[in-house]
Image (cartoon, rainbow, N blue to C red):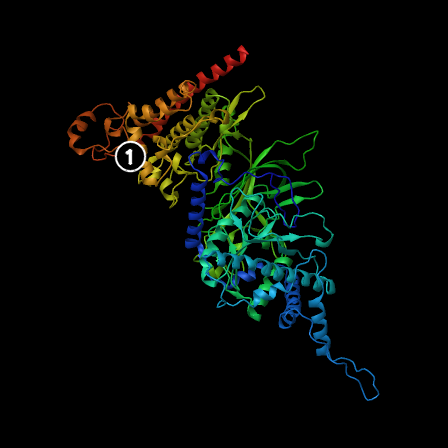
Amino acid sequence: MVTPTDPNGSSSATPHVRRNMAWNSAANVLSGDKTINEERVTEAKEHVRDGLSRNVSEVLAAAAPLDSDMRKKAVSLAEAVCQQLEPFILHKGNVPPRTTKKRNRRGQQLPATSRESKGKAASDSASEAPGQGAVDYSLLLKWVNLKSSQDTGSSNSKTGHFREVKMYPWIGAFIKYVADQLVKAVADSPPPKTPRQLETFRKADVVAIDADDWRRVDMALTQCLDLPQRDDRSDELFTYAQSAALIEVKRYETEETAAFDQLALYTPGLYATQVNRRFAWGLTICGTHVRACLFIHDNILASEVMDVATEPGRKQFVTLLVNWAMCESQRLGYDPTIRYNRETSQWEIDVWDDESRVTRTYICEYVVADTSSLFGQHRRCFVARAKESSDEQPAQKVLIKDAWAYAAATGSKAARDELSNLRAIRDKLDADDALAGTYSHLEAGGIVQQKGKRRGTLNDTTELILANFMASVRDNVKKRVHWRVATTPVGEDLQKVRSVDELIVVVGDVMAAHTAIVRRCDILHRDLSTNKIMFCRDDDGMVRGLLIDFNNAVLQANPHDEQRPDRTGIYPYMSIGNLEQSSVKRTALDDWESLIYILCWLGTIGINRDDQTNVKIRSDLTICHWRDGSATNIAKAKRRTLQHSDLFGNEILACFAHPLLYANLARLILELRSQLFYNERLSSLAQGCIDFDPMYSSIRNAELRTHYLDCNIDTTVVDPFARRAEFADAIVDDLLNVIQEHRNNALNRIKDFQLSK
């Protein structure tokens, strides 16, 4: 169990779900450890290649406190630390020889000059033993005096590797020195708040105990409170959850790109284990060159080089460390609207409601899903209840969804506004009791509000994070909006259904809700997957399907205007048109096609955890070609298999995990395929998955003079997907009739089974 860290160093027993690319994920049934590792490495390198901006001078200023008084105090404290550090380096960590005391003619001792007093104070302070659990400060001298030309062996050899490892205690000693000197400086001139004591974990080059892989992280900053009095070992056991920033170390300045790649590879561990992390910091240290890296949702902004071999470079690095110790939690990347309550040992989550203009506070019960990547929406989901509830009157559980969506062209509104979609769905379907509980019902939601510098609140956006220098990076940084919604009901994972019949009931409910939302709200979901279909179990044990997550939904009236440049959804469940980024308009048929892929996949691996036991998926199965490879190749594989009923039956349905138990599921899939791709109300031109050969145009012309729905569409339109899209409503009627008939039959079988018990 992982304990996420709050901004002030406390922790909670709130568990987190492993990253989506974790090895135990159902989506990665076909992938081994090596494959997932390779994917992560490739992704990290792509992020650095596409998102890294070097020499952004304003990055260091982004760590300074927002409060003007605290910012001035941080400057003076950094100066005080440097005044101790430079004499320490100058005298190589030793107390300089004492000057012979000056006396007057009468033999009386003369008072020391101000320069002599300062020098003695500096040397005495620098040579003081730091106390219990201290490190050897003199080790920092080896780092600041490290020369690139020094003969330490090749960086690619084992000798070079060990030389790199030798740097860890040197760097740790420098950071520890700054932390301890800051404590002394604060004691002489107390600031308005107690600074954090940031230092490195005692163990370096280790695997985090809360990691979901076996990668070794060089170093990490952690926050220590009352260090001399502690009897725990939290600074020894490296965890992502207790890390303020990760550090990647290389021996040579020429290895900087590799350092960025590895830091990008490790940093998602912070997001995965810290539920209140908005953005992240990191350090690359290559020889004596230090860069601070600010990780936001689409970018890595790296500072100019701070060379600790020079006095100006050391001053910059000391100032950065002092700013991190003194700044507000949100400047470190934490979200004060998700905070840990030490008195109750619970996480509290604020949800600002745009309509009522009030903040509702919820108590987190557990984390459903953490964020999974360095870049992207950083979507998290929590199950929570209202704070004002009691044991006597428990509040209804809500699902809180937190994400960073792309901002619209103007204003702070999200480009794809799930909040507006949820409001429209609630307002138009609320009175329909038949659909109650089958879609996400909005309880509260809006753009997350952060405190301003003086008073009031501000919308939480990338522009707020980069307020000091947004103008200088405007062309490179994609603007995002941080929003949060609370919805009901709280569903269960689709793969917790107990039988095929329950699965059929669930998808029947979901597609009924989907159709109502398309027709009455004019909203197209566009992103059906195993994660977007859930279910609720009533007190009598019966299940209801639940359709969630309208983040990628668009208005049906103008889907082309709303299409994103990248594809919507994940490859295994994407429609052929979506995979190919076809010019054919997106309709509800695309989501019905996704449903077929979902059901086929569950049939292959097992519909629930019990059925998945001992099921081995061979990589040569046809369905694997629906999941692996490029979007183009996956689309071709789907076209080929769906085109012929015999091929579909033999290569997909016949490979189900439990053919006899899943017979009813196979029948449903066959009928859905038939109605979607070979609907009898359409001509042959509109059937199948492959364009027709123009040589048969005369036959098609004769055929189209009959009663088919597409008889008025020109025969030059030979793409069956394009022809079917024009009659999506009619085809959906047929699909809905099929799934509702199967749902009702499944429901009757469930009831009969319950009565027989």
> Horizontal placement of 694 versus 188: left or right?
left
Q: Nearer the viewer, residue 466 or 14?
A: 14
Residue shown at 29%/24% (left/top)?
645
Q: Residues within 10 Å of mark 1 (few under 14, many from 20)?
A: some
Residue with the mark numbered 1? 722
Q: Quadrant of the C terminus?
A: top right
x then y, percent, for residue 510: 46, 27
Q: Is residue 516 visible?
A: yes
Find numbered disc 1 in the image and state the secondary structure of the residue it sits on: helix
Quarter of the image for residue 181 reads bottom right
Which one is in front, 314 or 637?
314
Q: Is residue 14 left or right of residue 461?
A: right
Q: How many marks?
A: 1
Residue 682's place in the image compared with 273, above or below, is: above
Placement of the N terminus among the 4 image quadrants: top right
Give the quadrant of residue 571: top left
Horizontal relation, residue 672 to residue 65: left or right:
left
Amino acid beneath label 1: Ala
The reply, left or right, for residue 480 in relation to residue 345 is left
- Residue 585 shows up from this direction: no
Q: Position of residue 381 (x, y in %)?
A: 55, 38
Residue at x 70%, y 40% (from the top left corner)? 344
Does 56 sit above or below residue 372? below
Q: Residue furthest bottom?
A: 105
Using the image as rendered, state which of residue 3 and residue 418 is in the foreground.
3
Query: In which quarter of the view is residue 723 placed?
Result: top left
Q: Position of residue 657 (x, y in %)?
A: 42, 24
For residue 83, above or below residue 547: below
Q: Position of residue 135 (x, y in %)?
A: 66, 59
